[in-house]
């Protein structure tokens, strides 16, 4: 098992565990007092760890594989919520968990290890321009935009951060990633995505928002990675990879509406 694959799996576990810990903290305190809860702080630390590990994974795995594995954090959230928060796990949730795990295993095999390559000419200015445009769009939609629009913008923000990270890794080593203009895009996309997602949860139900973001986060970066950044699928594995993505996304959509997921939002 490669370092990138291990990093992506651990990142998904960290994200899912962090969500459950933060949810447990909200049951002990409300408002600003939540941030003083050790469980909430631990959840934030796990979120940061997950993000850093996702950057490691993007160095050696294609975007469609990394993003699908990260979307699998919903599996961790739902299962841990059952154990920690006592939420109900429906029969369909159990089936979705098994389907997502199996689909992610197929994707891991179909992707294989693919070190990031240097992005094409003009990639950096285009990505920076898109990041600024998305920030403006979120600022406009933040007050009067609907949950669907905000969730879509949030998913695009997270997608942009992943694309910028994969592009920044091309032709660089170690900490050189942090010294590139694309590092600014990574941060801007991430902040914009988080703000849009939080606002989407304030204006609509958590299930549809999570489902929409999961789909956008997998489809958009995956497609751009294949078309622009040189990501590939192993010979003979294109069909299984597409099928696995469809199964994984379907399972994530089901899990987004699970009582376990709703309890963590």
Image: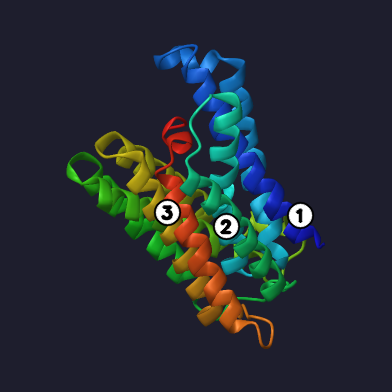
Residue placed farthest to the bottom in the image? 236
Query: Does label 1 or label 2 sit earlier along the sequence?
Result: 1
How are the colours assigned in the image?
rainbow
User: Which image quadrant is residue 21 in?
Assistant: top right
Given the current orientation, which residue lies at the most extreme left position?
A: 144
Which residue is tagged 2?
A: 100
Q: Earlier in the sequence, mark 2 or mark 3?
A: 2
The span from disc 2 to disc 3 (Cα, nearest Å) is 10 Å
Q: Quadrant of the N terminus?
A: bottom right
The residue that mark 3 highlights is: 253
How dense is the environment of label 1, judged by Cα within 10 Å: few (below 14), some, or many (20 and up)?
A: some
Which residue corresponds to the image point at 44% horizontal and 30% vertical from the top-left? 263
User: In the figure, 31 relative to 150: above or below?
Assistant: above
Question: What number is the disc on residue 6?
Answer: 1
Q: Nearer the viewer, mark 3 or mark 1?
A: 3
Q: Secondary structure at mark 2?
A: helix
């Amino acid at each position: 098992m490669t370092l990138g694959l291990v990093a992506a799996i651990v990142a998904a576990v960290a994200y899912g565990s962090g969500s459950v810990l933060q949810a447990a903290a909200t049951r002990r305190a409300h408002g600003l007092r939540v941030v003083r809860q050790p469980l909430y702080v631990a959840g934030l630390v796990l979120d940061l760890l997950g993000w850093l590990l996702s950057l490691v994974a993007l160095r050696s795995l294609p975007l469609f594989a990394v993003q699908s594995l990260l979307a699998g954090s919903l599996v961790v959230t739902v299962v841990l919520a059952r154990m920690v928060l006592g939420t109900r796990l429906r029969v369909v949730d159990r089936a979705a968990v098994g389907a997502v795990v199996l689909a992610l295993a197929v994707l891991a095999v179909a992707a294989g290890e693919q070190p990031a390559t240097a992005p094409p000419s003009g990639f950096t200015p285009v990505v920076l321009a898109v990041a600024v445009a998305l920030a403006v769009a979120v600022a406009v939609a933040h007050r009067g935009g609907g949950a669907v629009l905000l969730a879509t913008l949030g998913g695009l923000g997270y997608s942009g951060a992943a694309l910028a990270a994969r592009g920044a890794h091309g032709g660089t080593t170690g900490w050189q990633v942090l010294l590139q203009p694309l590092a600014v895009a990574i941060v801007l996309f991430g902040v914009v995505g988080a703000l849009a997602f939080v606002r989407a949860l304030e204006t609509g139900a958590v299930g549809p928002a999570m489902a929409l973001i999961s789909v956008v986060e997998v489809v958009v970066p995956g497609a751009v990675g294949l078309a622009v950044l040189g990501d590939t699928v192993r010979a003979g594995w294109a069909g299984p990879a597409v099928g696995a993505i469809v199964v994984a996304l379907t399972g994530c959509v089901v899990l987004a509406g699970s009582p376990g997921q709703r309890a963590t939002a």
